[in-house]
Image (spheres, rainbow, N blue to C red):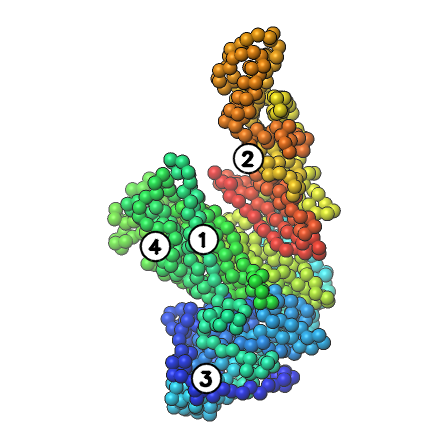
Amino acid sequence: MPNRLLLSRIPLLTVAFLGLAALPQQQALAAQLQTPEIVFTGSDAAPLAAKAGQLGTAVAIYEYVHNNFEFSTYHGSRSGSVNTFNAQRGSDVDIATALIAMMRARNIPARYAVATVRMPAAQFTNWLGIANLDVAVQVLKDQGIQKVALAADRSTVDFEHVWSEVLVPFEQYRGLTLPSTVDCSLASYAARCDWVPLDGSFKQKTYNGLNIDPYSALSFDYTGYYNAIKNSATDTLLRKDKNPLTILEEQIGTWLRANKPGNTLEDVADAGQIIEIHDGLLPASLPFKVVGGIGSVRHYDSVASHDTAAVGTEAKDWGKRLSITVGIVAPLTGGGTFTATLGAGNPLLAELNTKRLTLATEFPPPGNIPNVVTRLGGVEIARPLGGSGTIVGYNPKVGDAYTIYVSMDGTPDPTGGTDDNTVSATYYGILGGYYLIATGGESSNWQQVHNAANQLLTANDTYKIVFNPNESGCDKASGLNCTPFVDATKNGWDSSDPTLLDNKPALDALTGGLLYVAATQYYTKVREQFQRADLLMKAKTPIVGFLGIVSSTHEAEYIDGTAFSILPGGLLIDMKGITIAGSYRTNDTPLTYSNRQFEFLGHITSSLEHETWQELTGYDAVSTVRGIQMALSNGATLLNPKKNATADTLPGLYGALGFSIGNPATAFTYSPFTIGTTAPATWKHATNGSTFDLFQATIGQNTSDLRKSYGQYSYTPNSGLYGWSKCVSDQISSINASPEGSYTGTTCDGTAISGSKADLLNGINNDWKNTIIPQMIGQKYFDYFDTKHTPDPFDKSLYVYRTAPPANDAQETTNIANIRSNLYDRDLSKSWAEYLIPSKLTIGTTYRFTVDIHKEYSTADNRLTSMAFEINNLTK
């Protein structure tokens, strides 16, 4: 048998099994308990328990896990027993968790074991499916695995590793299926039982050995992809509605037919086949060496017991959590500000793999306090802002803004230090909006999608939607333009039926349910397509984690013919926290980082955002890449602002964005003033109220905040910067032209002045500096245009200008100013950035979006370190 041939090359180690003569009964029983991660009862765990029952014995359960579960390199527990069983994939901790749960479901005591192990390099690379040993070692480090060390002679690799142990009768410890009356969960049988180590995560695979590598021969045609809608009539590749991975697979297929005839995409991918074990016996030993011997192995009954071990025993927690904080800042009618920043939950990621986590707003009577409620699986776990009283001076309403801060444990410092990675994102929500906080990564799988869809279909049956037959404009047949009501009395619509928006359980089940389906489907496809793209391009991209929000506004309608009938308003997938630990080529030596692969995977994440909504609702949707395609099809050009040691492209692109450099549009006439020690730059125009935007074209780290900011100038002949400056300047000129004498009068703001010419000039200057500038014009605004301001005077030649408001499809001035700031306001010796942005907005009859792709690089090696596919809804 192939597995026997392969296993014969793995050093077999004799493990001393520990007797339990001194094991207290409560400790043995503790090994049977459920935990948040180890779940083996209840509806969610029913398939796991049923499979364990079908398999029956410890041997059969172990061999099932070994032969079917794929190993993922992430650290600790992010999945839990149920989701790991459903996904058939997990880390060493999560696979151990699933195996422990299956054992406990059969009343077989089981526990975790952890130690530093030493593995032969050949088995190590085979196990990870990474041919390059340096890449394999780097991947473990990038994922936060502790104590990773490659031997000086490169023959072995050390790393901290977790497996499980089961307590079985001594006479059956290798899996004999003879009937036994020995119950190892009872202390009375302790002397007749032994702990047996079982590693369900470690396995070897067979590969086809063809090593077909199309990476160097192919490149993805981003120009063709971005212009797919524009050129749809002539595009022979028909890329308009294709995912980037589909396009890549077609490219590889064409290349194979020309260069490797007879080979397929699967020959290229070569994911490997697990070498199965069917010995019918528990293993006699672990398939690797335990560094320090068996005495160095630590044992735990749960993830929590590991994480609460004595200080210094375990460097990093296995349990991973999500932290949520909400913040509200609002002006009070009597002056001042209402501010609240409050924690909104800290659940385990293992729990989030089988339950949806939502944030919603309630306004319980009789007061006005907006209750922000966090629910996990429909059960309230936090109400950070609650109560039914009132907030004096603040009357909150649907649509008011608040902030959602989310952060998730990422990869721990592989050295055991404090440089842990956290995946975080900030979102701007509105009161009345509905938000599903979505986490995922290697734990994402199709069973999550199926479960979410089944929950939503059940909710559709539970909460029947009806319409008011008297509602004006409502199409009762399709539900179009109808307010959805929940049929509480099951007798069709009547006046007692609440609207869907007022029925919190129904809203949570229907709106939350649809968002949950979207999130699970999106993450599952991202993980699946990342893995596929890596296999095809001989790369490895360690996933740290996925974090984002799927949201809707305070709206919902019934749309007949869609997958789930209820269509919330303002649906948005916004996954800011998709975090990977880089992309490495597995076929290159030495260790080679692939910017190409990183960039390609980023485009997959963006494309799937619009694809997911299109699949679920049947309606077109906009993502960043889709927005670029739509903008280019409407006549925009794709611009590439970039600033590094050798390129500075933004100044040359301002014209394409509608800006002029050095002077505003020709209709404005420059009309500066000098008033005492100030010299405001102003412009005249034939039309009162004419306006332009402006900001400094380039900046640096030493540029003041004043000069970094964006400004707007508006011409008004009798007020504003020009009107006040002209009035004061004219007064000064008039007094200077007058003969010496005694005078009375008023300043431009009506303040009485009298005395000699010098007295009047002094009064005007004092009024100018102390009243008109700070109170009538605004001190900061005036300083912005003051050509004598110290230490950073205004220099109009350094600025770019654009008439305001610009065309409806023009990029927002604030967005371009922010791009400028990010390009220039940094230490370019450490990092640099570039953008891809259409010269015009993505617009249609019902939408208006700005989209861009933002890339960050490290200067030392030009490594692409992050990509943001940014989209902002500007629809008014």
The number of numbered badges drawn on the structure is 4
What is the CA distance from the residue labelled 1 to the residue labelled 2? 36 Å
Closer to us: 832 or 51: 832
**Depth-wise, is mark 1 or mark 3 nearer the camera?**
1
Q: Which mark is residue 325?
A: 1
- Circle 4 sits on which residue? 506
Query: Disc 1 vs disc 2: Cβ atoms closer than 8 Å?
Result: no
Percent coordinates x, y for residue 225 in the rendering: 63, 51
**Depth-wise, is mark 4 or mark 3 nearer the camera?**
3
**Depth-wise, is mark 4 or mark 1 nearer the camera?**
1
What is the CA distance from the residue labelled 4 to the residue labelled 3? 46 Å
Percent coordinates x, y for residue 379 in the rendering: 36, 60
**Depth-wise, is mark 1 or mark 2 nearer the camera?**
1
Query: Disc 4 vs disc 2: Cβ atoms closer than 8 Å?
Result: no
Percent coordinates x, y for residue 774 in the rendering: 52, 28
- Does residue 590 appear anywhere in the picture? yes
- Circle 3 sits on which residue? 167
- Circle 2 sits on which residue? 808
Classify 10 Å Cα crowding around label 4: few (below 14), some (14-19), many (20 and above): many
Query: Disc 4 vs disc 1: Cβ atoms closer than 8 Å?
Result: no
